[in-house]
Amino acid sequence: MKEAIKVRELVKRYDSIEAVKKISFTVNEGEIFGLIGPNGAGKTTTLRILSTLLTITSGAVEVMGYDVGREPDEVRKIISYLPEDAGAYKNLTGKGYLQFIANFFNPRENKSMVEKGVAIAALGDRINDRIDTYSKGMKRRLLVGRALMTNPKVAILDEPTSGLDVSNAQEIRRIIREITKQGTTVLLSSHNMLEVEFLCDRIALINEGVIVEEGTPEELMKKHSAENIEEVFMRVVE
């Protein structure tokens, strides 16, 4: 099985603070991989490094064979990143925002890209309303549509269902599963342990900048004699 992401001995330091401490993991092509940890554990820093938004202090990171440090432009062409705190231009309509983003990509694919974003967001006629009239959940669905409409090789999603009710969150999880069938690899973080358990093929638990456990949800639950991933999480990060 080919590896879409390779992280080796990754260190990220801010002055005297070491946010990420020599972590290593791999993500296989077509896999949904969860990077899970409490606030301040280093997961968002890691996602931002993979997204070329932060530089590496030491170590090596590759995405689809491209070195994140030496070939950031090549990495940006094949990934999509959805931050937890992502925003959208509130004076645009939902569809207008998707069209605006699509204009940065291949003009020949602009129309089909927007249509895919509209379908993923699933906002009905509200897609034609201004974003400043949207609820938090509606904005999040629009942003998920924006992140996935580009057919990325690797989708990096920080809390993809943040702000969504149960029904909308289930729909987003269905979409994430579907895009992996089409060849997209997904790396995500989430505070929803049920989401992690039922969505991710494998997970890595990170705490204080160190990966403390890695494996499939089933493997980790069996190892820790736990009934669910939330129990495993609570045991290994305390």
Image: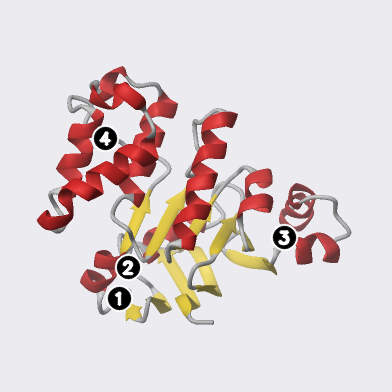
N-terminal of the two: label 2 or label 4?
2
Q: Select label 3 or label 1 by which is in front.
A: 3
Judge whether residue 46 can be spotted in this image.
no
Q: Residue 93, can we see it? A: yes
Which residue, given by chain and number where applicable, does mark 3 sit on?
217
Q: Is residue 223 above or below residue 105?
A: below
Residue at the far top: name it.
133
For label 4, the residue is 88
- The quadrant the N terminus occupies is bottom right
- Hey, which quadrant is residue 108 in on the image? bottom left
1 or 4: tag closer to the N-terminus: 1
Dot 1 falls on a residue whose secondary structure is: loop
155 or 151, nearer to the observer:
151
Q: Is disc 4 placed on a helix, strand or loop?
A: loop
**What is the residue that sits farthest to the right in this orientation?**
225
The percent coordinates of residue 10 (x first, y second) are 47, 74
Residue at the spot 42% in from the left edge and 57% down from the top edge: 156
Q: Name the residue carrying label 1.
A: 69
Gap in angstroms between the C-alphas marked 3 and 2: 31 Å
Q: Position of residue 158 (x, y in %)?
A: 46, 49
The reply to whether the C-beta atoms of the residues labelled 1 and 2 are less than 8 Å apart is yes
Is 122 left or right of 215, judged from the image as shown? left
Residue placed under numbered mark 2 in the picture: 55
- Secondary structure category for the residue under label 3: helix
